[in-house]
Image (cartoon, rainbow, N blue to C red):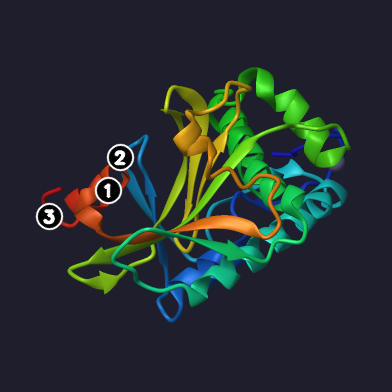
């Protein structure tokens, strides 16, 4: 099958990782695979370098998104210094280019959208696709609200960074996505209606340094998104 770049229509296309492969490499450490949960389908995948698609983008456009990928990887790595905490706390994290951090989250959502559209014909982004593409690969603004947290997920008390596919949700009544990268979670509000003030207070889309919530330690069984994983291994959620 010959694919054409979804932006410019040119062939050939190159391998596009939905989430930069560095996340999977960092997460799996010495293990052969990383575990990725799909909360929407209730499925679990094992992957060496995370999910990718061969037919989204030409080399030029894949590289154009690389600046966001690199920034997101570096930012997530900088959160590793924050360890287990009993109470959720807010910290300030170096973030010289806030628009790139938001762009990283949006690039993941956009690629994930296209994977669905090419594979099963669904268009999860609907009317957001075109303005999002013009923002990421052009220069038009795309205002979002972004909340960044470092999850501290444990299994029987042992830290277990868990990744999951993007999930579209209504969060506090707003059109949002949750991205779980294992070492970092992001909640991205897509529509223009603000979240309630107590949530909006944690928006870091334009903050430098970034405002990040280091979450209190949570057992995996208390997180609904990871129920498929627990059931897969014969546990009860
Ligand atoms: Zn292209």
**Which SS class for mark 3?**
loop
In terms of sequence position, does the residue under pointer 1 or pointer 2 come before the other? 2
For image coordinates 11% across by 50% down, the residue present is: 236
For image coordinates 83% across by 46% down, the residue present is: 61
Q: What distance separates the C-alpha of mark 1 from that of mark 3?
A: 14 Å
Check disc 1 and report the residue beneath it: 223
Check disc 3 and report the residue beneath it: 235
Q: What distance separates the C-alpha of mark 1 from that of mark 2?
A: 13 Å
Front position in the image: 79 or 212 = 212
Nearest-to-viewer mark from 1 and 3: 1
- Estimate how packed mark 1 is, as few (under 14), some (14 to 19) or many (20 or more) residues with alpha carbons within 10 Å: few
User: Where in the image, quadrant-wise, is ligand 1 located?
Assistant: top right
In terms of sequence position, does the residue under pointer 1 or pointer 3 come before the other? 1
Q: Is residue 209 above or below residue 111?
A: below
Compared across the picture, whether 81 is left or right of 145 comes to left
Front position in the image: 111 or 136 = 136
For image coordinates 73% across by 52% down, the residue present is: 98
**Which SS class for mark 1?**
loop
- Estimate how packed mark 3 is, as few (under 14), some (14 to 19) or many (20 or more) residues with alpha carbons within 10 Å: few
- Estimate how packed mark 2 is, as few (under 14), some (14 to 19) or many (20 or more) residues with alpha carbons within 10 Å: some
The x and y percentages for residue 193 are 58, 21
The x and y percentages for residue 2 are 75, 39
The x and y percentages for residue 29 are 46, 78
**Which SS class for mark 2?**
loop
Compared across the picture, whether 132 is left or right of 187 comes to right
Q: What distance separates the C-alpha of mark 3 from that of mark 2?
A: 14 Å
Nearest-to-viewer mark from 1 and 2: 1
For image coordinates 66% across by 37% down, the residue present is: 110
Check disc 2 and report the residue beneath it: 42
Q: In this view, does 218 lie above or below 53?
A: below
- Which corner quadrant holds the N terminus? top right
């Amino acid at each position: 099958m010959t694919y054409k770049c979804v932006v410019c229509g040119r062939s050939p296309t190159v391998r596009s990782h939905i989430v930069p492969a560095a996340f999977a490499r960092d997460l799996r450490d010495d293990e052969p695979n990383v575990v990725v949960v799909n909360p929407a389908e209730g499925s679990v995948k094992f992957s060496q370098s995370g999910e990718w698609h061969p037919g989204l983008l030409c080399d030029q456009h894949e590289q154009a998104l690389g600046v966001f990928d690199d920034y997101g990887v570096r930012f997530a790595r900088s959160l590793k210094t924050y360890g287990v905490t009993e109470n959720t706390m807010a910290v300030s994290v170096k973030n010289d280019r806030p628009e790139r951090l938001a762009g990283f989250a949006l690039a993941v959502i956009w690629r994930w959208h296209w994977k669905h559209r090419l594979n099963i014909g669904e268009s999860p982004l609907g009317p957001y696709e075109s303005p999002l593409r013009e923002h990421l690969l052009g220069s038009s603004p795309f205002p979002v609200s972004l909340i960044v947290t470092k999850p501290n997920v444990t299994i029987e008390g042992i830290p277990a960074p868990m990744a999951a596919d993007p999930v579209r949700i209504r969060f506090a009544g707003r059109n949002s996505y949750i991205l779980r990268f294992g070492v970092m979670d992001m909640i991205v509000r897509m529509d223009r209606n603000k979240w309630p003030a107590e949530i909006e207070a944690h928006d870091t889309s334009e903050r430098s340094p970034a405002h990040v919530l280091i979450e209190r330690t949570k057992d995996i069984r208390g997180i609904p998104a990871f129920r498929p994983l627990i059931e897969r291994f014969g546990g009860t959620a």
